[in-house]
Amino acid sequence: MFPIPNGQTDSSYKGQLTPDFLLNKFYNLISEYGNSSSEARKNVLKNAVACIDELINCNVNLSKILVEICGRTTKDNYEMHGRFLKALLDSGHVRWAPSQLVPSWGLNREGNPVSLFLDKAKASSRAIVLAKITIDYYIRMAKETKDLSVASPVLSSLHELVQLHELHSDLVYGTIRQLSFIPVKDPSIIIDRAVVAHPPRFRWMFLKPENQPLHKCKNPVFHLGDSSQLNVSGSAPRDEGFTVDIFAASYDMLWRRPVETSESGSKAQNPWLQAVYSTIHRFRMKSKPAVECHAFTPEMLDNPAIAALIEYKWYNILLKSLNLV
């Protein structure tokens, strides 16, 4: 909490702490940080953390705060904003819960600070440092909280990042490598409900596949099964001897889904016409791809998370449909 200014009561000062007031105060702290001595900067960072805490109390998560900083970032203040953000996010004071970092419903592009900082970097390569600071923070917090959703701002902007690999190869390769090792929060739950994607093995249709324990599976790739999938084909019983690290991976590492847009426009205003349009649209052959793969280089594909996702898709979907597993 900030110190109460002279002449104001606690209740009157708290009434001023609106999101707009706090965002402006936070932004002013960036300038104050740039003009302060190394010792005074410690107090500025503490005030910045207190300001963010107040914003979170007003239901403003950290991603929105970073979006506000990005909106006020210009070619004249890249370096100052970069120094402040790195000092703030690298400090030991910054330990917010996952829901305070990223809203549970996810982020659209306009609310994703990583995407917006990458846009700045396309206009000026110096701004890439701001994107890197933000990316490193989200991934680090995802690892500390063992919550893959915390890295969603990075995952949802990966398509744009990969396209910059010729200009910023170190950042692109480093980000993909870091995203490969985000641990799960409770490995015992994963082991209890693991449905393993086994390598292909040809068999007669009337033979049941063996229910292989996890510790006998070499580098197993699996997903969480529901009650109908446990102790059946492809699932493995709980194995107390399985003690290797378990990491989570998202299909966002392979592709992005195209943004859905309405094609009806404003022409079909009549409800009957809208119903006809909807029926035609539903049964129309769709030519647009369901997903758009990232523009990977061969080197990027040498990655354990990407390999696991492809292996799972191949083994558990294609080969099962052909009754080969």
Image: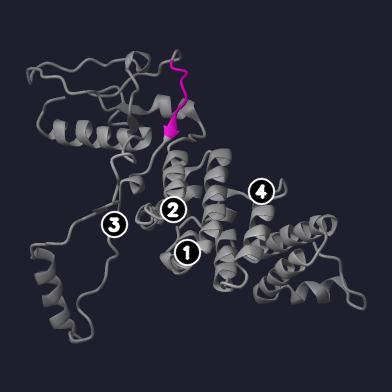
* Residue under numbered circle 2: 168
Dot 4 or dot 2: first in sequence order is 4
Residues at marks 1 and 4, CA–CA distance in whole angstroms: 21 Å
Residue on which the image places disc 1: 121
Q: How many marks?
A: 4
Q: Dots 2 and 1: beta carbons under 8 Å?
A: yes
Q: Is disc 3 in contact with disc 1, using a CB cutoff of under 8 Å?
A: no
Q: Position of residue 133 (x, y in %)?
A: 57, 53
Q: CA distance from mark 3 to mark 1?
A: 23 Å
* Residue bearing the label numbered 3: 257
Magenta segment main secondary structure: loop
The quarter of the picture where residue 262 lies is: bottom left
Q: Which callout, 3 or 4, points to the residue nearer the camera? A: 4
Q: CA distance from mark 3 to mark 2?
A: 24 Å
What residue would you read off at disc 4? Answer: 90
The quadrant in which residue 233 appears is top left
- Residue drawn at x 24%, y 37% is 313
Quarter of the image containing the N terminus? bottom right
* Place of residue 95 in the rendered image (x, y in percent of width and height, measured from the top left): 66, 47
Q: Magenta stretch containing residue 149, yes or no?
A: no
Where does the magenta region start and end? 242-247
Q: Gap in Å between the C-alphas at discs 4 and 2?
A: 22 Å
